[in-house]
Amino acid sequence: MERRYGIWVIFLIGLFFMLSGCSTEQGINLAVLKEKPKAHVGSSTCKMCHLEHFDSWMMTLHSRMTQDVQKNRDVIIAEFDEKRIREDLAKNPKLKVPADQIFIPKVDEIRYTIGSQWKQRYIIEKNGVLYISPVQYNADTDRWVNYNEDTWEKNPWLLKCGGCHLTGVDLEKQTFVETSVGCEACHGKGSWHAALPKTAVFEKRQTIINPSKLTSGVAVQICGSCHNRGKATKHKDASWPVGYEPGKALETYFKSTSFAAGDANHLYGNEFSKAHHQQYIDWKHSKHFAEGVTCVSCHYVHQIGVPPTRTQTRAAGSKQCFECHIQVNQNMAHSIHSFANCVGCHMPRITKSAESGDLHSHVFTALLPAGTLADKSIPNSCQTCHKHKNQDLNELQANWEALAKIPKPVGNVIDPIRYKKAD
């Protein structure tokens, strides 16, 4: 009896310590915590509680935006053969610096890479400042091209680009927190959130930004902070929104570029983008913007598993369009495109990332030959198709106008049948 009693005492003592161990999280005064400035903690801290989200983020291009060559040389996707690189460069008749004089970094000099899917650029350090070297590898076409070969040493990378290629850039200290578009790039600085115990559920929610719980018009500006081009308003030399935090008003920190303001290098005369990372500019001109359709209506940020498409869309090609749109007719212009290729006409490949036309327009409007006839520098949807590439523009426009007319009724008018009143 005494032995059984002793076993129960030991069991209860053990249970007491076990339960005590489950509640060892120290209480934190949220008001005191908020007196300290928020700071970045890095995605490696976020994964301790959000492992599934972290794993899904690791399958996106955001996680591989910038990669550290010093830690892993395999992030360089091309072979650095100087002879071959200079041969490729020499094929460009518009070089501003002779091909044999363009600086080509040695692999040992490369600190970081940018990109891996469409193209790759290479960051070097010079006198303590990071710069993008003047050569670029285009992955799809396996060729080397020049990149700002005459001005690359005048454009410090952190100042001009770093805020959108890294997380937690500090221009005063010339530092950054992590080499990727990490969790905090979209959710905000996480030091307060990470400091609170898991049991402080509601308090933790107050200390982090969840874009899915913002109004859609505010949330989409998070995407627009980097898928954009222009100038910072809080820093005279920066080309990214210095000081912007997720959930804030982007226009306060950044002004987008435009053709009307004189930027013919990056936009066509109709304000459609010709350069990459300008999807937000295009979208602002679209009916999607007017109707409240945002980036995440078509693209996901992170989800479990391998991305189903190269561009992280919820469905492939025009199948994505049919998530919302229904093809209600087979006449007019649709009569010759009954295979439902929405993307081919309404998102023509007129934007350049690595090679001309490797990205889609995001204005979601079919560009007619008439636009090109009025301004030869503006492309049209018809000629992005290989079948019509060299076809006469006047003929293409005439064909479209003929198809776009609603056909008139054909046949004889039938006299109405008159009914007699019953007797």
Image (spheres, rainbow, N blue to C red):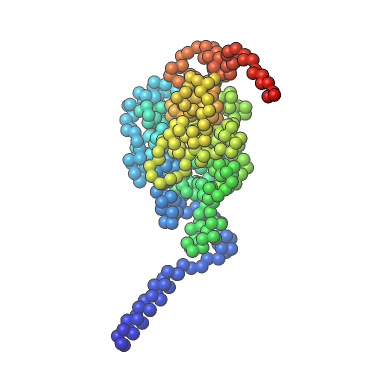
On the rendered image, what quadrant is the N terminus found in? bottom left
User: Which residue is nearer to you in this view: 284 or 343?
Assistant: 343
Can residue 405 be seen by looking at this rendering? Answer: no
Q: Position of residue 118 (x, y in %)?
A: 41, 32
In the displayed structure, 167 sits above or below 367; it is below
User: Which residue is nearer to you in this view: 74 or 101?
Assistant: 74
| Residue shown at the point (43%, 45%) measured from the top left | 303
| Residue shown at the point (40%, 76%) measured from the top left | 16
Q: Position of residue 236 (x, y in %)?
A: 60, 39
User: Which residue is nearer to you in this view: 24 or 148?
Assistant: 24
Count of numbered labels shown in the rendering? 0
Task: Locate residue 422 relative to residue 116 in the image: left or right.
Answer: right
Can residue 23 be seen by looking at this rendering? Answer: yes
Q: Position of residue 324 (x, y in %)?
A: 52, 35
Residue 366 sits in quarter: top right
In the displayed structure, 89 sits above or below 190; it is above
| Residue shown at the point (61%, 35%) measured from the top left | 290
Identity of the residue furthest to the front in this view: 423
| Residue shown at the point (44%, 42%) measured from the top left | 62
Residue 3 sits in quarter: bottom left
On the rendered image, what quadrant is the C terminus found in? top right
